[in-house]
Image (cartoon, rainbow, N blue to C red):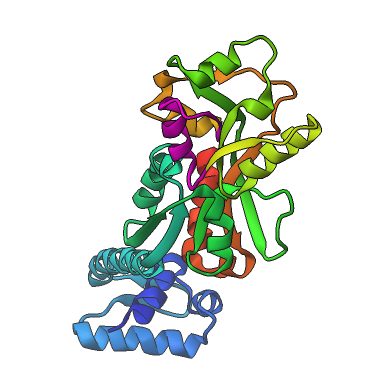
Amino acid sequence: MDFKDLTIFQVLCDTLHYGHTAQRCHTSASTVSRVVQRLEDELSHQLFERDRREVRLTQAGSLFREFALRSLDQYQQLQRQLNTQASELSGELSLYCSVTASYSFLSDLLAVFRERHPKVDIRLRTGDAAQAVDTVLAGEVDIAIGARPDQLPSRLAFKPVLPVPLTFIAPNQSGPVTDALNSGDINWQAVPMILSETGLARTRVELWFKQMGLKPNIYAQVSGHEAIVAMVALGFGVGVVPDLVLSNSPMTEKVRILQVRPELEPFSVGLCVVNQHLSNPMVQAFWQVSEDWLKP
């Protein structure tokens, strides 16, 4: 007795016609007859009464029909469970992002991803946001979270998550930097600047100074925007950081925002993936989760 025989038997119970059953099961009437004979031999009971005009279920046939229904239903449930388990993603997915991104929007995004794909092991690497694109292009990680470069490399796919303004910040405490900023028109060439070593924020600041016809007085070049906030809070100079970094910094109250004109061009923070890695099922899954998470 197998599930194919049970299926043919169940169809015959519905049609009570050997020819119609054969058509629906894509087989022959003689095969249907052999299936019934085989089941009756195994059960030692007649399942159908048949003559030239009609086919009828016997009492044993009705009881066996209930058994067949339960068995087929349980078999289909088992198949669905096995298919679900077979299709459940497992493995390792590597991510790169800044510390700020890790405890701001990434935490919510990962919560959704883990709920859908609990068997995927996330390997998170944090560092300077300016290195995000280079890190993913070098193949060191599957996905990076960073700012979209002005010229997106042809090998790279980018999914925007949120726009991020760039902000000039100054120390709240009194000192030489505060005095220089409070002396009427700001002499920007005399103001010590704390800038990121590389990245889009550095490019935006240099362009701003160039448009002003000035050369920045660089006091320090640091890796990571979080370090810029810390140095500004300590009174060493004026910095430029993404608003996302400032709003999540523990030193927010120790700095103040400077209103400058023209404003710096904001940038878009999002997911960066090498195009060929989009065929990776885990990358596809993370990409899809991010789309769903971004929907209002």
* Identity of the residue drawn at 61% across and 70% down: 276
Residue 229 drawn in magenta: yes
* Identity of the residue drawn at 38% across and 80% down: 4
Q: Residue 89: in sight, yes or no?
A: no
- Quadrant location, the N terminus: bottom left
Residue 209 horizontal/vertical position (percent): 73, 34
Q: Residue 140: in sight, yes or no?
A: yes
- Quadrant location, the C terminus: top right
Residue 10 horizontal/vertical position (percent): 38, 70
* Front-lying residue, 29 or 249: 249
Say which quarter of the image contains residue 60: bottom left
* Front-lying residue, 218 or 124: 218
Residue 248 horizontal/vertical position (percent): 42, 30
* Front-lying residue, 231 or 247: 231
**Region of the chain picked out in magenta, as a range:** 221-241
* Identity of the residue drawn at 48% across and 48% down: 223
Say which quarter of the image contains residue 11: bottom left
Q: How many marks?
A: 0
Left or right: residue 55 compared with residue 262: left
Residue 225 drawn in magenta: yes
Left or right: residue 127 compared with residue 161: left
Residue 110 horizontal/vertical position (percent): 39, 47
Residue 244's place in the image compared with 172, above or below, is below
Say which quarter of the image contains residue 184: top right
Residue 86's place in the image compared with 159, above or below, is below
